[in-house]
């Protein structure tokens, strides 16, 4: 593990706030994902008609997914800014600030006028708010993961780092469930209510996060004068290879999710309009399964290492690319549900559960948030184009185009993990467990 030789003054058993920090990070991450994923769901189901009604169906879908992608383009900038601030001034202020910005932007989407009301101003406002969402979401992830990781016991960091990652599917499940509940409402309320209600979640998360203590590793680095003058530039100069590895590792997860939850959802509902409630229900169920699987995957990395789980997940994703469409092209509800649950509840969850510790351990304390955030959000920006690229490829090649895109991302991820060293192998696990056991015996 990158940091175990540099934090001898901190407790190997973790801080006294380790559990509270993990729960608060997960709660905030779930809200951030609710806000961000609500936009993706609305783009797949409603926005082409609400904000681009003068286009034909295909063009409207492409424009809707293009506005979805704009938010992803802003995420690397948000990650760079948030990472710099977190490594320079602390993890906690970034978590609170990102939550405020994200919550405000999401609430405003629920208040936006439609094209029928103000014409071309409607999609312009939508794009501006989407850009703000992207900045906030880009800033949030690195701080949440780093904060949890640095508060955790050394021998359980895989499990603890997976807790805020479990907030991802929790937010997704909440957003999907809300859209499912609102599907029978009249007119624009079907998509406005999920955005407006996010304000309640944001307030709760802000109260919890504001009570957290700062990362003990950051506080120690600050006391020892080890804070980088410019963490972002140091990351680019010293850790650029690690950033590239993070990008490769993240691409498979990002493409796997958005190719499934956004494009695949749109693909099915366009072909079989009556299956929309089933597809939304399946997405919700898959997200609930993913909450548990993400946590289990992270816990397992503390026993077998980070690489084995990631390698298996990438291989399974490669094999799953064509069956996901072959099994659902006739719209059989049971198969639609099975594909969503397997693709998101197992493949995607295995990747996200491993990422919390794996990506964080590519960097030292002084550049940890900057490096992990930058690589993570650059890959997210690319992944944001997955629905748009899938739609274009399907327009050209038919459904196999979407499968080829999914498979290509999985191959990139497999290459990435094969060239990434194990950060918590057998020797490291033995060493860390010995340190933890010694500290426990000294305390007792």
Image (cartoon, rainbow, N blue to C red):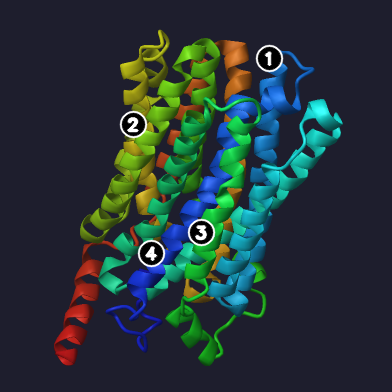
> Which residue is the site of mark 2?
341
Mark 3: few/some/many CA within 10 Å (<14, 14-19, 20+): many
Measured as percent of width and height from the top left, residue 273 is found at: 51, 13
Measured in 3D between alpha carbons, the distance from the residue under mark 4 to the one under mark 2, in whole angstroms, is 25 Å
Label 1 with label 3: CB-CB less than 8 Å? no
In front: 310, or 88?
88
In front: 157, or 59?
59
At x 48%, y 64%, the residue is 144
Circle 1 or circle 3, nearest the eye: 1
Residue 350 to residue 136: above or below: above
N-terminal label among 2 and 3: 3
> Which residue is the site of mark 3?
242
Measured as percent of width and height from the top left, residue 301 is found at: 27, 56
At x 58%, y 82%, the residue is 227
Mark 2: few/some/many CA within 10 Å (<14, 14-19, 20+): many
N-terminal label among 4 and 2: 4
Measured as percent of width and height from the top left, residue 324 is found at: 39, 21
User: Label 4's element?
Assistant: helix
Which labelled disc corresponds to residue 23? 4
Label 1 with label 4: CB-CB less than 8 Å? no
């Amino acid at each position: 593990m990158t940091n175990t030789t540099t934090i001898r003054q901190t407790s190997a058993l973790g801080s006294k706030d380790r559990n509270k920090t993990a729960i608060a990070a997960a709660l905030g991450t779930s809200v951030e994902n609710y806000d961000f994923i609500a936009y993706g769901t609305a783009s797949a189901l409603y926005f082409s008609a609400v904000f681009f009604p003068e286009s034909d169906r295909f063009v409207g879908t492409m424009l809707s997914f293009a506005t979805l992608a704009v938010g992803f383009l802003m995420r690397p900038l948000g990650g760079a800014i948030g990472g710099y601030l977190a490594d320079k001034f602390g993890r906690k202020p970034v978590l609170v600030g990102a939550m405020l910005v994200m919550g405000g932007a999401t609430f405003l989407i629920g208040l936006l006028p439609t094209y029928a009301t103000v014409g071309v101003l409607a999609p312009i406002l939508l794009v501006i708010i989407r850009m703000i969402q992207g900045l906030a979401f880009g800033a949030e992830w690195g701080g949440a993961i780093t904060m949890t990781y640095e508060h955790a016991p050394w021998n359980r960091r895989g499990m603890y780092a997976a807790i805020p990652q479990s907030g991802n599917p929790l937010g997704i499940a909440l957003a999907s469930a809300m859209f499912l509940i609102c599907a029978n409402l009249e007119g624009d309320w079907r998509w406005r209510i999920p955005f407006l209600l996010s304000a309640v979640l944001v307030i709760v998360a802000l109260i919890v996060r504001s009570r957290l203590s700062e990362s003990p590793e950051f506080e120690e680095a600050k006391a020892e004068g080890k804070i980088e003058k410019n963490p972002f530039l140091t990351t680019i100069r010293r850790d650029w290879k690690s950033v590239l590895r993070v990008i490769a590792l993240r691409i498979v997860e990002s493409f796997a999710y958005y190719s499934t939850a956004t494009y695949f959802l749109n693909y099915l509902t366009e072909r079989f309009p009556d299956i929309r409630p089933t597809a939304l229900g399946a997405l919700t169920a898959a997200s609930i399964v993913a909450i548990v699987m993400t946590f289990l995957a992270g816990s397992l990395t503390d026993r077998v290492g980070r690489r084995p789980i990631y390698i298996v997940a990438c291989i399974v994703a490669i094999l799953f690319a064509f069956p996901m469409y072959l099994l659902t092209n006739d719209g059989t509800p049971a198969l639609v549900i099975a594909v969503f649950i397997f693709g998101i509840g197992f493949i995607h969850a295995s990747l996200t559960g491993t990422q919390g510790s794996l990506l964080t351990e590519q960097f030292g304390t002084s550049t940890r948030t900057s490096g992990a955030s930058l690589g993570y959000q650059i890959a997210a920006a690319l992944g944001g184009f997955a629905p748009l690229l899938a739609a274009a490829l399907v327009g050209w090649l038919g459904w196999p185009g979407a499968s080829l895109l999914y498979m290509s991302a999985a191959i990139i991820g497999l290459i990435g993990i094969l060239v990434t060293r194990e950060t918590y192998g057998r020797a490291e696990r033995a060493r860390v467990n010995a340190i933890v056991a010694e500290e426990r015996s000294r305390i007792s």
